[in-house]
Amino acid sequence: MTRNVAIIGTGHSKFGVRTDVNMQELAWEAVSQALEESGVEQKDVEFFTVGNAGAWSSENLPAIVVGEYCGLNPKGTMRVEAACATGSAALRDAYLAIKSGEVDIAIAIGVEQMHQSPNPTVVELIGRAGNYFWEFENSGLTFPGYYALYATAYMAKYGAKEEDLGLVAIKNHHYGSMNPYAQFYGKEITMEEYLKSRMVAYPLKLLDSSPITDGAAAVVLASEEVVKKYTDSPIWIEAQAAASGSANLSRRDDFTSIEAARIAAKEAYKRAKIDDSEPWKSMDVADVHDCFTIAEILAYEDLGFANRGEGVKLIREGQTKIGGKIPVNVDGGLKAKGHPIGATGVSMAVSMARQLLGRAPKGTQATIRNGRALSHNVGGTGHYAYVTIYSTRRPGN
Amino acid sequence: MITDTRRRIQEEIDKSLTQLDQLVKITKLPIITDKNGSPLWVDVRELDLRYQIPVKKIYKFYEGLGKGKVMATKCPKCGAIYFPPQADCSKCRSSDLEWIEMPAEGEVVAFTKIFVKPVSFSHYPDYYVVVARMSNGVNVTAWYRGKDQPKVGERVKLNVVERDPEGYLTYEFEPWG
Ligand SMILES: [Zn+2]
């Protein structure tokens, strides 16, 4: 048995340096909002997943700590990890629990409190995400370092410039400055500031990078059988697909594209019956995984919004701003909204649902014509990829 | 010397812990205030992690380093070459792989220079990391020791070296010419 699944409530904490709360208090900010919005009570929730990459924060079993604090015991749970795609993986497990017919209501929670450890420790822990023994132990690669490898290969092959990457950062800061939940709310940046910012891993600078963030997001999901009890405006999860890539970056053939993302996108389009030659035409808005500016350009191409090597044209022409071909990361993206690892994928689902409902913050609302949105969430450096398609129309209708 | 490096790092840790001890003496609580004015409990339990990773099945790789060779494994059935070396060919479900030497010549596919370093690499000067496609078509990720920034497409040479200050054997690239 498989059936349709919809988002019936969304919750999102303020992202940023959130040392004013602990991890479970932070999760509760998102969970309470999602419960409130959906009208669902804890006793109605049959299963919950907690996306938390952890290691930098003290709780080793975050799912049960969050479950207790949010009053979700004794329902079943699990901690989910897929590096930076952890949130999408948490969404996937909750979605599949309903889709399979086992439960009618589930919550996907993503939470991360990275500021429980000093920044150098966080740099170390993220750098270990990949093949620890062969690629970290000897090489000391960092997270920006891994994406920098893609950046140098892409720039050499397609002639992309530092300034092109800067355009991504400026766009995402522009929209993030209008998103009250964003870490860099109210903070636009200029090309001059971008070019002058400190080098982190050549050619990526501080302003190419998403920040270290604390944050939480949650969505309440329901089966099509019970959706009507709670809302007239559900956001359906039309399709989701996942793929993986080699742990060792040296095992990759190509450093100008994320293969796992291409595979996940292709499969998601197939499941949603979307023409993958021009998929952007059937979409109104997308959130893509811009942990670094180069990653957003790769995402344009991996999702088929641009041909290989032409992603850079899309940003130069402003086609991914509101009013362009396909608005991308108009919530600020990871770059300006922040990137609390385990929360990011769920945060994307919240942003896309609110976009489709016309509830985006002022200045960041895309025009909704097709009633369809997409999120692209990559874990590690193309180690995991999740592509999710959301729709205002019930699939099959 | 690695012992000097380690002593220097330990001294810094001790200094910050001594400050914490003094705070606890005065306030009876290990609570500091961060720059946002939020009180933070500084963990009184410390966990030092140093993993012990089994290498029995690829031990020939380490013997190879001792002889100045970078070794890989090759599946006699399908011909797949594995670097980093691995004991099993999952394609063929075969476990009797041969050991071969990696070629010295490669070409840079991607590179970076790490400025903001992990804690455990903080004692090294900024370093270049390169992914190079070796002449047998297999990629290797390693440090690059050259005066100038490497270029995509540049020829590089793979060497066995001693990594200082630790003094353990590993492999690195250098410019070809
Ligand atoms: Zn084989």
Image: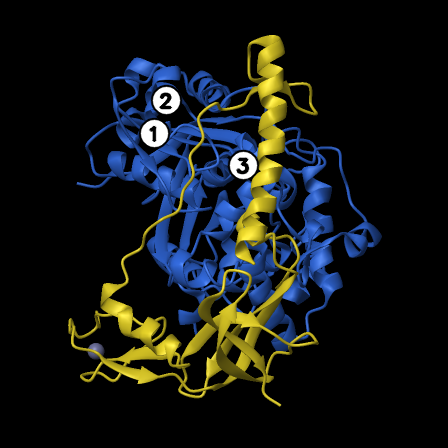
Instruction: Indicate whether B75 appears above or below A49.
Output: below
Mark number, residue A65: 2
Q: Are marks 3 and 2 on the same chain?
A: yes
Q: Do labels 1 and 2 share a chain?
A: yes
Can see residue A300? Answer: no
Quadrant assignment, res A100 = top left
User: What is the total number of numbered labels drawn onto the structure image?
Assistant: 3
- Whether tag 1 and tag 2 are in contact, CB under 8 A, the answer is yes
Instruction: Indicate whether A138 appears above or below B161.
Output: above
Chain colored yellow:
B
- Give left or right: position of B49 versus B11: left
Q: Which amino acid does label 1 sit on?
A: Leu
Name the secondary structure under disc 3.
Answer: helix
- Give left or right: position of A258 versus B80: right
Q: A7 or A184, which is in the foreground?
A: A184
Q: Which amino acid does label 3 sit on?
A: Ser
Q: Name the residue under label 1.
A: A61
Give the distance between the C-alpha atoms of the residues marked 1 and 3, in whole angstroms. 27 Å
Chain colored blue:
A
Q: Is mark 2 within 8 Å of ligand 1?
A: no
Disc 2: CA contacts within 10 A as few (<14), some (14-19) or many (>=20): some
Q: Nearer the viewer, mark 1 or mark 3?
A: 1
Residue A295: image location, x then y, percent: 57, 57
Q: Do labels 1 and 3 share a chain?
A: yes
Residue at 38%, 41% in the rendered image: A237
Residue B110: image location, x then y, percent: 56, 72
